[in-house]
Image (cartoon, rainbow, N blue to C red):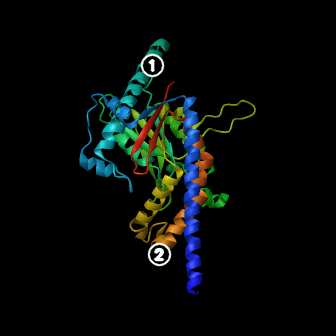
């Protein structure tokens, strides 16, 4: 290639990058305009980070610095400031909700003249891949377990209710793993029904991100938790309503409180890429890892592959199935590019 052709190729690449940046900027501006318009008629009350932090009141900080390290995500380092300003007020709010539900249950059992078993309080945590759902769920589990009225707090991810890879392959939907149709929804609904009914012991299947599949001989045992946190991509997804009016429960029908972790899709894309590259240099290097093949790729090849996975699978799932459920959440945590929660939206009713 001649020097002139090389300069032309470089110029074309720069123009392409600039064009992509302009498109992203326009998308952000459009989304912000729609958000501003929606707030006028929103059923939510929106709190700034500072306003929300004041709602902590006298809630004590019960986590130690070494615990924060264990609770942090692969690319999200949990800080004391974030816990104190965001998660302590949230744990206080949830504690009030749990107490209110316990009182309501006591009133109902008195009215019915019977002594029922306790009803677990179930919290749903939804949001995109790489947005930080797991970190939020882990922090809430740790904080809520410190409150005296509900010491037993369990956490289950809906990944365990994905169909095994063999079944996804047989159905021809392996490339739609994480989409609503890739989950055994009937099994998830039965699990939640068993938990909510106060069954003594309930089993949940276990998913391995290392093997990228269900572990067939392993289960998690839940023994009548006070609180259960259910974290997953599509936990707020409504079912398709039947034309004959027959009853079809939604997963979210079992939730007493729901949280959506929100961020700009372009920001989540950057987080997804960062997490992918971090795993490529750590977990993927193990020959037994499902994604071991990416460890031997060059950094540039791995980035191209990661962005392809994001755009063709994860972004598509976000836009088609996950983001449309945001308004079904009782509380929305809005994050910025540095993983800090910048605002909190709480339903007024």
Location of residue 83 (image quadrant): top left
Q: Dot 2, crowdedness within 10 Å: few (<14), some or many (≥20)?
A: few
Position of 58 with respect to 349 (left or right) is left
Q: At 29% from the left edge and 29% from the top edge, which residue is drawn? A: 148
Of 148 and 339, the residue lying toward us = 339
State the residue position of label 2.
Answer: 298
Q: At 41% from the left edge and 43% from the top edge, which residue is drawn? A: 341
Residue 106 spot, x, y in % from top left: 42, 18
Residue 274 spot, x, y in % from top left: 44, 61
Q: Residue furthest bottom?
A: 2
- Name the mark on residue 104: 1
The CA distance from mark 2 to mark 1 is 59 Å
Q: At 62% from the left edge and 38% from the top edge, which residue is drawn? A: 238
Tell me the element at label 1: helix
Viewer-nearest of discs 2 and 1: 2
Tell me the element at label 2: loop
Position of 193 with respect to 228 (left or right) is right
Q: Are marks 2 and 1 in contact (CB under 8 Å)?
A: no
Tally the numbered discs.
2
Of 312 and 106, the residue lying toward us = 312
Q: At 35% from the left edge and 29% from the top edge, which residue is drawn? A: 55
Residue 16 spot, x, y in % from top left: 58, 66
Q: Earlier in the sequence, mark 2 or mark 1?
A: 1
Relative height, residue 97 to residue 112 (above, below): below
């Amino acid at each position: 290639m001649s020097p002139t052709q090389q300069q032309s190729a470089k110029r074309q690449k720069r123009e392409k990058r600039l064009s992509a940046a302009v498109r992203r900027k326009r998308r952000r501006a459009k989304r912000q305009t729609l958000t501003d318009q929606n707030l006028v008629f929103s059923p939510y009350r929106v709190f700034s980070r500072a306003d929300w932090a004041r709602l902590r009141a006298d809630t004590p900080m019960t986590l130690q610095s070494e615990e924060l390290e264990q609770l942090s995500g692969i690319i999200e380092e949990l800080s004391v400031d974030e816990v104190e300003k965001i998660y302590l007020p949230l744990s206080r709010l949830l504690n009030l909700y749990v107490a209110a539900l316990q009182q309501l249950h006591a009133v109902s059992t008195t009215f019915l003249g019977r002594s029922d078993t306790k009803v677990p309080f179930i919290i749903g945590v939804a949001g995109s891949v790489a947005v930080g759902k797991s970190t939020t769920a882990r922090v809430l589990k740790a904080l809520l377990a410190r409150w005296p009225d509900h010491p037993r707090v369990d956490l289950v991810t809906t990944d365990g209710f994905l169909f095994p890879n063999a079944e996804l392959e047989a159905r021809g939907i392996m490339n739609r793993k994480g989409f609503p149709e890739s989950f055994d929804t009937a099994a998830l609904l039965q699990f939640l029904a068993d938990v909510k009914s106060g069954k003594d012991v309930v089993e949940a299947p276990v998913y391995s991100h290392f093997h990228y599949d269900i572990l067939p001989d392993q289960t998690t045992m839940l023994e009548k938790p006070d609180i259960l946190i259910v974290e997953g991509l599509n936990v707020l997804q409504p079912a398709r309503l039947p034309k004959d009016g027959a009853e079809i429960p939604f997963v979210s029908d079992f939730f007493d409180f729901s949280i959506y972790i929100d961020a700009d899709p372009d920001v989540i894309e950057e987080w997804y890429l960062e997490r992918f590259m971090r795993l490529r240099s750590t977990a993927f290097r193990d020959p037994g890892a499902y994604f071991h093949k990416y460890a031997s790729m060059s950094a540039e090849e791995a980035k191209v592959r990661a962005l392809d996975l994001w755009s063709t699978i994860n972004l598509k799932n976000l836009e088609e199935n996950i983001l449309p459920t945001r308004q079904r959440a009782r509380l929305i945590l809005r994050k910025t590019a540095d993983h800090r929660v910048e605002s909190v939206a709480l339903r007024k009713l």
